[in-house]
Structures are given as C-alpha cells and as structure tokens.
Image: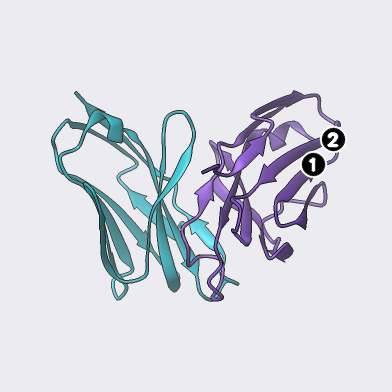
Amino acid sequence: KNEVEQSPQNLTAQEGEFITINCSYSVGISALHWLQQHPGGGIVSLFMLSSGKKKHGRLIATINIQEKHSSLHITASHPRDSAVYICAARAVNRDDKIIFGKGTRLHILP
Amino acid sequence: DAGVIQSPRHEVTEMGQEVTLRCKPISGHNSLFWYRQTMMRGLELLIYFNNNVPIDDSGMPEDRFSAKMPNASFSTLKIQPSEPRDSAVYFCASSLRDGRGMGNQPQHFGDGTRLSIL
C-alpha cells in the first residue's frame, strides 16, 4: 500500500462542476503539498499546508491532521483546469523525505 | 522574474554515454531539489541541497548518479554511464528554506529535461 494515496486516479467532469480530489496518507507529516502538472509537463506548486484550509482563487485545499486526509477543491471548473494534480507529504520521521501520490488526472469538458 | 532554468530541455543519447543535466535556481533561493518522473514510478525526489550542501541523497538510484552544487546559482545532475531505464523527465526545483527543513516553503519547478537513453 502506498504511503500517500490519491483518489480518484482519473476524473472527467463538465465545465462548471465542483471538483474534489482526495489525498490520504499513512505517515506523520509536517506539511502537505498540492502540485499541478499541465499537459505540457510543467509543474506548479499550488498549496503547502500543515493545518486548516487555504484558498487561492477557485482552488481550496483542506487538511485534517487527525484523519490524515487532505482535499483539493476546484469551484466553477474550467477546461484550463485540466491537468494532473499531485499530492506530496513531507514525512516527519523519514528525514523530512517527501512522498508523492500517483496523481489524479482531471479532464474538464467544455 | 526568471524562474528555475533547466538545460537541456531534451536529451537523446545512447546507453553508456555520460549525461549532464543543469539547473539554475531562482536567485535568492537556498534550497534546490532534483526530481525524476516516470510513468511507472511517478514523481520521485532524488536529492536536495540546502545552502549548496547535499542534505538527503537517499533517493539517488545508484552510484551512476551524482549531483553537485558548486555555488548558489548552479547545480548539475550527472549520470555515468547512462542506461535505458534512466529515461525520464528530470525536474529541478528551488525554494527558500525557513530553517525547519525542506518542505516548509513552496517549491518553484523548472520546465524539466526529457531524457531518452537509447
């Protein structure tokens, strides 16, 4: 079992829909990252959080430390949101190693 | 502002050859990371530096891989000899280190080097 699990693996939705991508982890962490990788391959760091919630535009990231779970939400989704979203956990007892999820491939249809 | 700059963007070479990937971090950033991405294994951290010093190289697959950071504005990842299984996209990222470790500041990624070993 991977230490960082994402779901779903693939998601196709219509433009305007509310999107939720989930990340569960089994290690103790000090921070969790959400990354976005566009079809062209470039990677952008969206959020880094260790508690609570962060919001940037239409993107919202939440984390529940007790439940070892984080979610990334996209409101009013748009085709340009189509990308792979990657969750990455910084493990406190693993020499600060970052452990990546396999990613969620999101496709927003116009 | 210039982001993280990687070169080359693409590299195709025959197995057994030496490959050198280059990275220029964002000016002022004091942490630098090398990642590898493949279809099979996804994104993996290879090594990271703080203030030009390698901190954790446990992700480096084997002795054929080496990384250096001779100064704050330049790093290299070298593979010698290269093998077909090294084919991947290699990303470099940089960030500010806040004194608590590698993961506490957003990382800025370069566009990656797509490496193909024939």
Residue A60, position as x, y percentages in the image: 24, 54
Badge 1 amino acid = Ile
Assess whether mark 2 and mark 1 are in contact (beta carbons under 8 angstroms). Answer: yes
Answer left or right for A66 relative to A35: left
Residue A98, position as x, y percentages in the image: 53, 61
Name the tint of chain B in the rendering. purple
Q: Which residue is mark 1?
A: B79
Q: Which mark is residue B112?
A: none
**Image quarter of residue A109:** top left
Q: Residue furthest front?
A: B1
Residue A35, position as x, y percentages in the image: 41, 49
The structure residue drawn at horizontal position 23% and vertical position 48%, both measured from the top left corner, is A57
- Secondary element under disc 1, as helix, strand or loop, is strand
**Image quarter of residue A110:** top left
Q: Quadrant of the C terminus of chain B?
A: top right
Residue A41, position as x, y percentages in the image: 49, 33
Q: Earlier in the sequence, mark 1 or mark 2?
A: 2
Q: From what the image shows, is residue B112 above or below residue B72?
A: above
Badge 2 amino acid = Glu
Q: Which residue is mark 2?
A: B18
The structure residue drawn at horizontal position 54% and vertical position 76%, both measured from the top left corner, is B100
Q: Residues within 10 Å of mark 2 (few under 14, many from 20)?
A: some
